[in-house]
């Protein structure tokens, strides 16, 4: 029997059913192929792409831009996968490092987890705000001038509003290694460094400082002097004790690093003229503590102030090997200087 006759005998309903089955088979093959390949990596050699998701940006816009930049194969697959996984509304704003070497589900997971691109910044113990600023600029994180401005105007709750400090963040940019979000502003970087100091300066440490009648700013200021003077870790508590003993007796601190900080340049030798440099930071020119820290001290120097050595020393004299001779009287200090010119 001819096919035309068979179709006439079976009628139009049977024909329509056969066509629908055929369409479903073809569509199923297409969907299966799309579903298994739409989320595949674009290329094993795809270049790095810095991709920013804006706050409140719809998923459709994100998917379309990903496809245009060659990060994913299919924006439609990306959206469908996100909708099925109920994560379409969970993507987080930020800048991400992406390549077409990652499958679409892996990229979506980065967005949901907020695994944004970061810069690694290490702040060594004793770095000043100026030193941190230059490092930030050298690593292309933020400009030095922007960070200096943020540090100068930082809203520091531990300083009086009119305190004559050079940088309101100085001493509070805690030395550590940070993963800074890509695209962070200078103010955001300052906030991150300060937040780490707040975390490290525990309530127990604040209570101990209060017991010794010291404010957090006073602790950090003394610790910054210890950081600058100490070269051997075991001497930190002794050096802290010298500064505390002199404060209790109303003696000037006469710390050479404060003169360097006041003058804005490192001095290998502090002359009698330098000692008279008019600055609130100069502890030869002024009685008592500077208005704020002269560097960003690390935890060992802070702890040395909170746990000073039980000694009566009032003087110390530095030796070429980094150690110090400690003395109780000025006569002993002069003798140490004569013995080690």
Image (spheres, grey):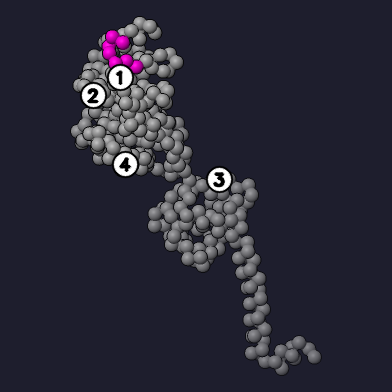
Q: Mark 4 sits on what residue? A: 204
| Residue range corresponding to the magenta coloring | 326-332
Which residue is painted at 27% across and 40% down in the image? Answer: 207
- The alpha-carbon separation of the residues under discs 3 and 4 comes to 46 Å
Tag in front: 2 or 1: 1
- Residue 145 lies in what quarter of the image? top left
Residue located beneath label 3 in the image: 48
Q: Earlier in the sequence, mark 3 or mark 2?
A: 3
Q: Earlier in the sequence, mark 2 or mark 1?
A: 2
- Which mark identifies residue 313? 1
Q: Rounded to the nearest whole Å, what is the CA distance between mark 3 and mark 2?
A: 57 Å
Whether the residues at callouts 2 and 1 have beta carbons within 8 Å, the answer is no
**Foreground: disc 4 or disc 1:** 1
Mark 4 and mark 2 lie on one chain; the one further toward the N terminus is 4
Disc nearest the viewer among 3 and 4 = 4
- Image coords of residue 313 (percent x, y): 30, 19
Residue 247, labelled with which disc? Answer: 2
Asked if residue 115 is positioned above or below residue 305 in the image, the reply reads: below
Q: Label 1: few (<14), some or many (≥20) within 10 Å?
A: some
Under tag 4, what secondary structure? Answer: helix
Task: Work out how far the residue at label 4 is from the one at label 1, CA to CA, in angstroms.
Answer: 27 Å
Mark 3 residue crowding within 10 angstroms, few (<14) / some (14–19) / many (20+): few
Circle 1 SS class = loop
Q: Is residue 167 visible?
A: no
CA distance separating discs 3 and 1: 59 Å
């Amino acid at each position: 029997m001819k096919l035309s006759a068979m179709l006439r005998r079976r009628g139009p309903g049977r024909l329509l059913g056969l066509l629908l089955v055929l369409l479903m088979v073809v569509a199923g093959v297409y969907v299966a192929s799309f579903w298994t390949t739409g989320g595949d990596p674009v290329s094993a050699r795809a270049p790095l792409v810095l991709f920013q998701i804006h706050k409140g940006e719809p998923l459709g816009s994100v998917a379309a831009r990903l496809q245009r930049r060659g990060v994913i194969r299919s924006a439609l697959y990306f959206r469908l996968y996100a909708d099925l996984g109920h994560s379409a509304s969970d993507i987080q704003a930020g800048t991400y490092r992406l390549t077409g070497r990652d499958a679409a589900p892996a990229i979506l997971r980065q967005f949901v987890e907020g695994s944004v691109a970061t810069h690694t910044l290490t702040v060594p113990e004793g770095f000043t705000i100026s030193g941190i600023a230059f490092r930030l600029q050298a690593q292309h994180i933020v400009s030095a001038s922007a960070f200096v401005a943020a540090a100068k105007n930082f809203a520091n709750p531990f300083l009086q509003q009119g305190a004559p400090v050079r940088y309101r963040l100085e001493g509070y940019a805690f030395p550590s290694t940070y993963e800074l979000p890509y695209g962070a502003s200078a103010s955001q970087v300052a906030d991150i460094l300060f937040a780490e100091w707040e975390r490290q300066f525990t309530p127990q440490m604040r209570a101990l400082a209060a017991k010794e009648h010291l404010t957090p700013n006073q602790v950090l200021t003394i610790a910054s002097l210890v950081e600058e003077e100490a070269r051997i870790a075991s001497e930190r508590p002794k050096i802290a004790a010298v500064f505390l003993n002199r404060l209790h007796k109303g003696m000037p601190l006469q710390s050479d690093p404060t003169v360097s900080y006041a003058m804005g340049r490192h001095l290998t030798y502090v002359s009698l003229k330098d000692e008279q440099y008019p600055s609130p930071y100069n502890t030869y020119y002024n009685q008592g503590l500077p208005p704020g820290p002269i560097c960003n001290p690390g935890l060992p120097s802070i702890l040395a102030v909170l746990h000073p050595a039980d000694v009566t020393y009032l003087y110390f004299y530095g030796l070429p090997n980094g150690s110090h001779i400690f003395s109780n009287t000025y006569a002993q200090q002069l003798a140490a200087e004569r013995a080690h010119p």
